[in-house]
Amino acid sequence: MRKVYEAWEEGDIKAGTWGAMTFGTVESIQEQRTKGLLAPNARLRYRFEADTLEEALAVHHIKMGWSPFQPAGKPTPCPNACGGFFYPEGSGECPNCGRIC
């Protein structure tokens, strides 16, 4: 169940400094914009697709140059026997079936 994720930066773009990074699905970013939680001058840093939040956070960490992302809990086989694994203590999303718990 691929979703589009975005990373937006806020700060003094001309000076090359930033103070905040906002990361989430396109829908959650739009909701934050609507509520005024994302600065009007925020700049899109990058956009990509991922099957689960854990996958998206792993990619986000790579793109930011951070240490590897460590998902919450242990991977568990999907109860739908689709062959996928998911993190019930994390997002609860199976890459094949979507939200499980």
Image (spheres, grey):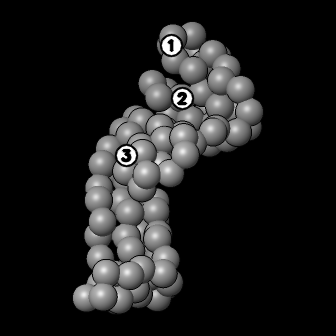
Residue under the image location 36 percent in, 60 percent down: 6
**Number of other residues with Cα within 10 Å of mark 2, as a class: few under 14, some 14 to 19, many 20 or more:** many
Where 39 sits versus 71, above or below?
below
Q: Quarter of the image holding residue 11? A: bottom left
Q: Residue 63 at x, y = what percent?
A: 37, 50
Q: Quarter of the image holding residue 80? A: top right
Image quarter where the N terminus lies is: top left
Where 12 sits versus 53, above or below?
below
Q: Secondary structure at mark 3?
A: strand
Which amino acid type corresponds to the residue marked 2 in the rendered image? Cys
> Which badge, 2 or 1, is on the more N-terminal residue?
1
Image quarter where the C terminus lies is: top right
Q: Residue 66 at x, y = what percent?
A: 50, 51
Question: Closer to the camera, 58 or 32?
Answer: 58
Do the CB atoms of the residues marked 2 and 1 lie less than 8 Å apart? Answer: yes
What numbered label is drawn on residue 3? 3
Question: Closer to the camera, 15 or 20?
Answer: 15
Determine which residue is flagged by label 2. 94
Task: Confirm whether residue 92 shows in the render.
Answer: yes
Question: Closer to the camera, 63 or 79?
Answer: 63
Which amino acid type corresponds to the residue marked 3 in the rendered image? Lys
> Which badge, 1 or 3, is on the more N-terminal residue?
3
Determine which residue is flagged by label 1. 82
Q: Secondary structure at mark 2?
A: strand
